[in-house]
Amino acid sequence: MLLNVGLIGCGNISGIYLENSRYYESFTIIACADLDRTKAEEAGVKYSVPHVMDVDELIALPDIDIVLDLTVPHAHADIAVRAIEQKKHVYSEKPLAITIEDGKRIVEKATEYGVMAGSAPDTFLGGSIQLAGQMIEDGVIGKIVGATAFMMSRGPESWHPNPEFFYHIGGGPMYDMGPYYLTALVSLLGPVKRLTGSARITYPERTITSEPKYGEKIVVQVPTHVTGILDFEQGATATITTSFDIAAARTPFIEIYGEEGTISLPDPNHFHLPVLIKKNGEEEWEEIKPKTDLPENARGIGLADMAAAIESGKSPRANGDLAYHVLEIMHGIHHSSNHGKHYEMESTCEKPRLLEKQADFNKQK
């Protein structure tokens, strides 16, 4: 049975969701909306969406089962709560919300109204991380000792047309890219119980070198080089660094260290890139390509999994508890840095189940 999805926010990321909707058998996008009506109308024509309407109309439409929220992060909580109060399931782009309070409100509201809340990133459901997860469960590298994760860049002001929001409240490298790395780590190692953080603003002012705002200045409001040490409930520790201050780096994206070997993962912003593994006593790294029938950019798989879970009565893998746990980790790292002490996590979550077969999602309509 297809569940009906209403999409709110017809910006850049909406295109891949609309394009990929034809790959997934569990949902269909029947309506779209945007504060800029022109954007919604353009998306409706380009992707043959049956209904184009205002945001309020879409949230209230009885035929909508799931609201797909692709708005800017600071609008996620408002859209989610309004949709939940209309007894609709909600799936949003990352992060779940900007503040811990709003994230908790979304999860609690969903429980109160008996609906599901979920959130991107869903890249952990791609072939790369699923393959690594299977190897870990099979004991290929033995008991897990620790992990590292690095997102090292020079910042978006050299290429993004409107980069200011990356440096304002709610932005920064941890809140922008951290969800991909942290969700991957939690999906592989389980929840975090305690952490420590250190964060700094390296350059108080940034100069835009992209068009059309070349030469304009940005006053930096958030840390741009952020490091956390994570203690997982199962005993492993991990280090994560996200930065907009790095000219160049040769660090791996994510590595998982076991007593009997190491798994090196590709950029967690992608789905199906090869995984490297090197076991004790071996001289060379072995490259393993994931087997999948999904498109290279499989965004929307988390939404497809949620729709399937609604029908089956199971919990979706990219669920609200996971997204809220990741949100608290990011806040905890900054809180620890600000207060100079460990941060004890209040939330927890279930380690997401591995997918049985990725091909199950790829039945074109």
Image (cartoon, grey):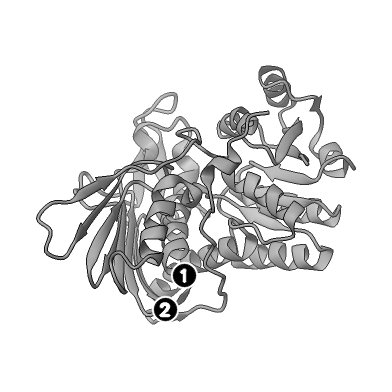
Residue at the extreme top of the image, as rendered: 45
Q: Image quarter for residue 198?
A: bottom left
Residue topped by disc 2: 234
Counting residues from the start of the chain, the first of labels 1 and 2 encountered is: 1
Q: CA distance from mark 1 to mark 2?
A: 7 Å
Q: Position of residue 40 (x, y in %)?
A: 71, 26
Crowding near the residue tagged with mark 2, few <14, some 14–19, many ≥20 C-alpha atoms within 10 Å: few
Q: Secondary structure at mark 2?
A: loop
Query: 116 or 359: which is nearer to us?
Result: 359
Vertical position of residue 257 compared to residue 68: above or below: below
Q: Residue at x 48, y 72 (%)?
A: 191
Examine the rendering and report whether any part of residue 187 can be seen: yes
Q: Secondary structure at mark 1?
A: loop
Please indicate whether residue 165 sits to the left or right of residue 18 in the image: left
* Residue ID at (81%, 27%): 51
Numbered badge on residue 318 = none
Could you tell me the amino acid type at mark 1?
Answer: Gly
Q: How many marks?
A: 2
In x, y percent, where is residue 69? 68, 44
Q: Is residue 128 left or right of residue 73?
A: left
Q: Check if mark 1's residue and mark 2's residue have beta carbons within 8 Å.
A: yes
| Residue underneath mark 1 | 190
Determine the image quadrant of residue 197. bottom left
Q: Foreground residue, 148 or 174? A: 148
Q: Is residue 223 visible?
A: no
Image location of residue 7, percent across then percent down: 71, 37
Q: Residues within 10 Å of mark 1 (few under 14, many from 20)?
A: many
Q: Could you say where residue 268 lies in the image, as x and y percent from the top left?
A: 40, 48
Q: Is residue 275 left or right of residue 6?
A: left
The quadrant of the rendering that contains the N terminus is top right
Q: Amino acid at mark 2?
A: Gln
Instruction: Decide if residue 90 is on the left or right side of residue 176.
Output: right
